[in-house]
Image: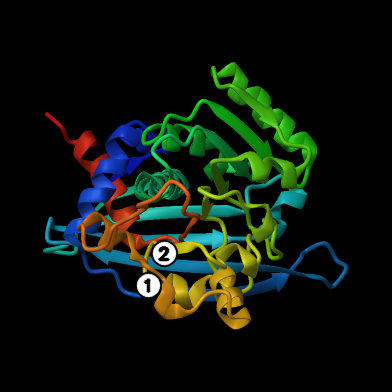
Amino acid sequence: MRHFDEAATRAPLSFDRLVPALRAAFAAGAQVPPRHVHAIETEAGNGDGGTRKGTVLIMPAWSDAGFLGIKTINIFPANSEHGLPGLHATYVLYDARTGVPLAMMDGNEITARRTAAASALGASFLARSGARRLLVLGTGRIARMLPAAHASVRPIDELWVWNHRPEGAQALAAQWRAEGWNARAAPDLEAAVRQADIVSCATLATSPLVRGEWLAPGSHLDLIGSFTPAMREADARCFDGALTWVDTDEALQKAGDLLDAMAAGTLRKEEVRGTLAALCRGERPGRSDDAERTVFKAVGSALEDLIAATLVWQAGNAG
């Protein structure tokens, strides 16, 4: 059983390779059972009788290509108070025909890169072809990758970043400038949303951050952070009058943003235009008018993990 550390997992997953690979995989399909979700509550360990709460996700998938993968993700939002990432993941790749373990990979890197790539894949169908101004909400691992991902499908040349801790946004903007981006922190979220072509949310928020009345005609709202009914990044009005797409049908049961909008009546289940698979297969058209406002809601798919892990395995065994 081989081991691919963070650097070895990252190397084959450039967005110019990963985004097209995801597009082909969604068009072809795979076996993706519903994820297992478990709530974890343990003693905080600091002697005050408090508890620490987390969520464990178990995500399997397999395909006719002969690979079976299982990702385990541990999400502990309170980790930020202790200087730790809120998400840790591992990925195990197996031979689907024999069950033999092939490799252990860095699940954090796979999760972040495939999430950013799926975000860009959605935008390749739904954002205006000339979209150039990207606003990122969040400063975590996934948020940091969004400019490169979206620039692989749209002519992004201006970046804004907002975070509930302004110093975090300022630090990330400075990092992006050092990498050659035209980037700045957004002190006023409303003003930044109103000016953005693409608003991409990659947070663990449990209360809405983006308001529907802020979104400009023709804008694209990308919601990739929240993935449980208790999480939400956009209010119900964000879906009112917008063309809404999801990564998979599972989003309709798991995404707090969608559940809120359906409860409020600003979105009906039958009004959701379709999934990434429908877009990639050409079964449904994406954006058809520059004035349309679009929303893409993703909760993540084990298919994306499997494709990323397959690319890593193939690169590690090339030659």
Q: Nearer the viewer, residue 269 or 120?
A: 269
Q: Which residue is mark 1?
A: 249
Whether pointer 2 and pointer 1 mark residues with C-beta atoms closer than 8 Å, the reply is yes
Which type of secondary structure does the marked residue at label 1 adopt? Answer: loop
Res. 68 visible in picture: yes
Whether residue 267 sits left or right of residue 22 in the image: it is right
Q: Residues within 10 Å of mark 1 (few under 14, many from 20)?
A: some
Give the label on residue 246, or none: 2
Q: Position of residue 165 (x, y in %)?
A: 78, 43
Disc 2 secondary structure class: strand
Q: Is residue 1 visible?
A: no
Amino acid type, label 2 = Val
Three-letter amino acid code of the residue under disc 1: Asp
- Alpha carbon distance from label 2 to label 1: 7 Å
Residues 144 and 153: in front is 153
Which image quarter: residue 109?
top left
**Residue 232 rendering spot, x and y as whole percentages:** 63, 65
Residue in the image at 39% along x and 60% along y: 71
Q: Quadrant of the C terminus?
A: top left
Q: Position of residue 107 (x, y in %)?
A: 43, 50
Residue 301 occupies which quadrant of the picture?
bottom left
Is residue 44 shown above or below 152? below
